[in-house]
Image (cartoon, rainbow, N blue to C red):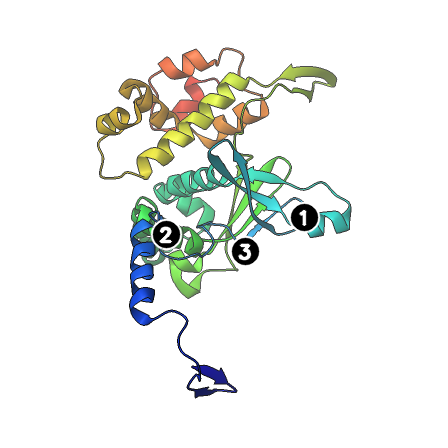
């Protein structure tokens, strides 16, 4: 059969492959095809695609690298715009950024005091609506099947800067069309990256002094967020079963999970290298932390 300008015409030659052979080949191809992780060829899920921007305001897209048998995904500044501007691009691991932002969103939605503070709402009825919607989104963020949709509903823009990440939250999703302004902003310290040695210059009391960020602490915070993401990805699996599946120590995973809920002020101090000298990786892993952020800050010397 030949189709020309919308009209189908019967072919005038014998089929090259008869229908029986064609069906047999298709059947064998289907049997031998490798299993697919996704049902379609669409781009792999990325929470912040089309709403993530680098320090120069340029959109960031998905990029890949391969090392051995492992494939790594990154958000990266669009190369054409970087070349045009003669600037340096930005690249960050998809998993690191998404787990970091989702972790902070989870903390925000579970903290009514912080929700009240960021929204500025005082009316009782609107607060009740805010808390109810926050609980709904909190549940959706903890469910792998609904997490992407929840993030893309809540987050309207993510701006990566030199020292922080600004997350714009769609307030209307939490309090309806009556939300003042276009949304709320959540400013986070830059997410922890793989440890590297770097001396930083800090100005204190009029004197310049070099200090080194404690990379063991930075690595610990990174491990804590990775552990929380692992737990959230398996909500129906008990922690001891998860530790057994991952071949890890249950007690260590428990402590790392607790550390993932550290006060943002403490995490920010560790990222910037301004934590008290007495705060070490060993001490943070051994200490019994209060769920209260203000109590954590007092106990660890941030008060």
Earlier sequence position, callout 3 versus callout 2: 2
SS for callout 3: loop
Mark 2 closeness class: few <14, some 14–19, many ≥20 residues within 10 Å: few
Q: Which numbered tag is attached to residue 38?
A: 2
Q: CA distance from mark 2 to mark 1?
A: 28 Å
Quarter-of-image position of residue 239: top left
SS for callout 2: loop
Q: Which numbered tag is attached to residue 79?
A: 1
Relative placement, left or right, of 129 versus 117 is left
Q: Are marks 3 and 1 in contact (CB under 8 Å)?
A: no
x then y, percent, for residue 1: 42, 81
**Nearest to the observer: residue 37 or residue 49:** 37
**Nearest to the observer: residue 152 or residue 237:** 237
Q: Nearer the viewer, mark 3 or mark 1?
A: 1
Relative placement, left or right, of 26 versus 87 is left
**Nearest to the observer: residue 135 or residue 120:** 135
Q: Nearer the viewer, mark 2 or mark 1?
A: 2
Relative placement, left or right, of 40 versus 198 is left
x then y, percent, for residue 85: 76, 49
- Name the residue tied to disc 3: 50
Mark 1 closeness class: few <14, some 14–19, many ≥20 residues within 10 Å: some
Quarter-of-image position of residue 39: bottom left
SS for callout 1: helix
Q: CA distance from mark 3 to mark 1?
A: 15 Å
**Nearest to the observer: residue 79 or residue 66:** 66
Residue 107 in view in this figure: yes
- 38, above or below 202, in the image: below
Earlier sequence position, callout 2 versus callout 1: 2
x then y, percent, for residue 217: 49, 19
- Picture residue at 43% right of the left edge, 29% below the top: 263
- Picture residue at 32% right of the left edge, 46% below the top: 144
């Amino acid at each position: 059969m030949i189709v020309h300008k919308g009209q189908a015409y019967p072919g005038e030659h014998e089929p090259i492959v008869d229908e029986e052979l064609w069906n047999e080949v298709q059947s064998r191809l289907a049997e031998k095809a490798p299993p697919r992780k996704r049902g379609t060829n669409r781009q792999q899920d990325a929470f912040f695609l089309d709403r993530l921007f680098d320090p120069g305001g340029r959109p960031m897209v998905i990029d890949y690298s391969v090392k051995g048998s492992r494939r790594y995904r990154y958000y990266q500044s669009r190369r054409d715009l970087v070349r045009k501007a003669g600037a340096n691009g930005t690249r960050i691991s998809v998993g690191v950024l998404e787990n970091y932002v989702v972790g902070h969103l989870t903390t925000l939605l579970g903290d009514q005091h912080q929700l009240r503070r960021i929204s500025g709402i005082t009316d009782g009825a609107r607060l009740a609506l805010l808390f109810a919607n926050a609980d709904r989104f909190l549940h959706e963020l903890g469910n792998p099947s609904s997490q992407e949709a929840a993030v893309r509903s809540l987050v309207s823009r993510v701006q990566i800067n030199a020292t922080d990440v600004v997350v714009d939250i769609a307030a209307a999703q939490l309090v309806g069309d009556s939300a003042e302004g276009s949304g709320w902003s959540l400013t986070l310290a830059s997410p922890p990256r793989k440890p590297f040695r770097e001396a930083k210059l800090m100005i204190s009391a009029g004197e310049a002094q070099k200090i080194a960020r404690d990379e063991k602490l930075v690595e610990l915070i990174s491990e804590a967020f990775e552990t929380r993401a692992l737990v959230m990805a398996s909500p129906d699996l008990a922690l001891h079963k998860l530790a057994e599946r991952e071949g890890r120590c249950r007690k260590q995973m428990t402590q790392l999970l607790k550390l993932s809920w550290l006060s943002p002020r403490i995490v920010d101090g560790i990222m910037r290298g301004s934590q008290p000298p007495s705060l070490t990786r060993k001490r943070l892993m051994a200490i019994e932390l209060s769920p209260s952020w203000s109590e954590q800050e007092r106990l660890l010397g941030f008060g």
